Image (spheres, coloured by chain):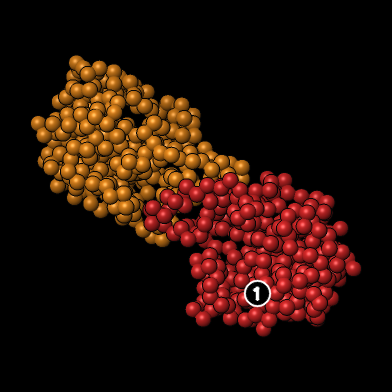
Chain colours: A orange, B red
Amino acid sequence: MRVVLLSGGGGGARFARGLAGILRPGELTVIGNVGDDVEILGLHVSPDLDSLMYTLGGLIDDVRGWGRADETWSALEAVATWGGEDWFRLGDRDLGLHLVRTAALRDGALLSDLTEELCGRLGLGARLLPATDDRLRTHVVTPAGRFPFQEWFVGRRHRDDVDVVEIDGADRATPARGVVEAIVAADAIVLAPSNPYLSIGPIVAVAGIRRALVERRVRCVAVSPLIGGTAVTGPVDRMLTRMAGGATPAHVAQCHTGLIDALVIDEADAPAEAEVDLVVTRTLMSDRAAERGLAEAVLEAACA
Amino acid sequence: MRVVLLSGGGGGARFARGLAGILRPGELTVIGNVGDDVEILGLHVSPDLDSLMYTLGGLIDDVRGWGRADETWSALEAVATWGGEDWFRLGDRDLGLHLVRTAALRDGALLSDLTEELCGRLGLGARLLPATDDRLRTHVVTPAGRFPFQEWFVGRRHRDDVDVVEIDGADRATPARGVVEAIVAADAIVLAPSNPYLSIGPIVAVAGIRRALVERRVRCVAVSPLIGGTAVTGPVDRMLTRMAGGATPAHVAQCHTGLIDALVIDEADAPAEAEVDLVVTRTLMSDRAAERGLAEAVLEAACA
């Protein structure tokens, strides 16, 4: 069974771990968002790819929800004392990855090839692909101005309401090698419980990926990131309310119009109606068993 | 009293600390070697400037003799697991400096301006100048081949004998702003007990610096890095024996022909004869008091 998952970091990465736990090695391909990518202190950082890799590879700090377990912060402390930019939290272990990747990218490597090599070192059973090797940068337009994603999300702690999300570079970006092929060959396609605007949006903003999804011959199921109309983490509920007019399953489904056949929602959001099939289950991934349980329910919905 | 010191890292940096301890703020200008500079993992590293800055600023690991005290190594461990180059020991705290400096250099800053700013943050009483803002790279020619300095020194643990030291870029390099002015305005000039070929050599390979030293109107005194014909650390004794034909004060003095008026040597190397005045004292910097004692003896010789 070949499953393709479109995902951001955070909850998406945990859901990916749940899927990887019930699929056989080689069956899962994760297409990761790169709209959050950012250059910090000259380093290329891919936060969503990293969260996916760290989570699937058992390196993630599960309590913090991002970055590496047993992390130390000596380098960033030193950066601050020398007057460098320290608003983006880069741990010492995390830096090791950014240093290696940035050096390779400068030498001309593709992000997708690098990601494959790095995942190989972790011995991951799942395949991880960046949506594109081209430069894609999410920006948010807010009443306080237009901000690059990380400046708003981390620097301003996403305090500004968002009116529009713009994906710079999407008009020219082409899917990374293997992305369209994986979608075409999939037996089921899943959109992770990630932010539809900020995590899934930049992936499907790549025309070649959107086209492959629209033309799919298998079911595509999205998992709602809401529980009782509220975000488990992050600003998705506020964004839905402001940008889509509400935070119900119907509003989530509207974000994915034409791309999905069903939406998996939490019991707390049922009963509800939407333009696609709704599948009700418990979506809170409170532990590893819950992650796998949700993954099973989603696969069942995808194969219905 | 204005003193100019030409220095590498290690023993040179400790000697600089001794001088700084007996001079008033603003009296000492250190001109640091940049022939050892190296790009590692895309980062610009200036090992001698860093050793000088860390030593003068109280950040050095005095036991190890390089890098920062209370250092951690998480980033480099991660680099190794991701397959990155880890032969050059970069600690986490140390990385903070390299990240800030590399980002600034990429933005067009000059190494000399950056060094001034960084020293300002440490509140150093001494002024630290790189010999040049131009690219200068020391290479060694050995029976096993020609190597960039750090590949030979760190990567091969300087195991190969050296036949020739070549300073790439010296023919085009100009002194950094303030270097010649400091030499011209000095009341005394000192060459630290650093390796004449590898630490002092690259500085005086810059024609503008050599000219200013040759045309000096004050005394210039070198401190021998040998004690009893042996290096305190590093390969200087082997290099002198092979390249100059011996490791006596006369051979050290020959390395600096035309540049010095006196050579300060250790009691263990006396009596001796050389082409310049010899001043005998105890040169082993076993503690901070010994550093200051040596600095006093050297200043006395420089003002003789």
Q: Residue at x 65, y 48 (%)?
A: B59
Q: Residue at x 15, y 46 (%)?
A: A184
Tell which of A225 and A124 is nearer to you. Answer: A124
Tell which of B225 and A214 is nearer to you. Answer: B225
Q: Farthest residue in the right direction?
A: B304
Give the quadrant of the C terminus of chain B.
bottom right
Disc 1: host chain: B
Q: Is residue A63 visible?
A: yes
Q: Dot 1 corresponds to which residue?
A: B237
How many dots with numbers? 1
Q: Is B262 placed left or right of B161 in the picture?
A: right
* Residue B119 horizontal/vertical position (percent): 69, 50
Q: Quadrant of residue A202?
A: top left
Q: Farthest residue in the left direction?
A: A304
Q: Is residue B204 visible?
A: no
Q: Quadrant of residue A20?
A: top left
Q: Is A163 placed left or right of A303 in the picture?
A: right
Which structural element holds mark 1?
helix
Q: Is A146 placed left or right of B232 in the picture?
A: left
Q: Amino acid at mark 1?
A: Asp
Disc 1 crowd rating (10 Å Cα; few below 14, some 14-19, many 20+) is: many
Give the quadrant of the N terminus of chain B.
bottom right
* Residue B264 horizontal/vertical position (percent): 79, 70
* Residue B109 horizontal/vertical position (percent): 61, 54
Q: Is residue B60 above or below residue A91?
A: below
Q: Residue at x 82, y 74 (%)?
A: B278
Tell which of B131 and B8 is nearer to you. Answer: B8
Tell which of A96 and B237 is nearer to you. Answer: B237
Q: Quadrant of residue A12?
A: top left
Q: Residue at x 52, y 37 (%)?
A: A87
* Residue B197 horizontal/vertical position (percent): 65, 73
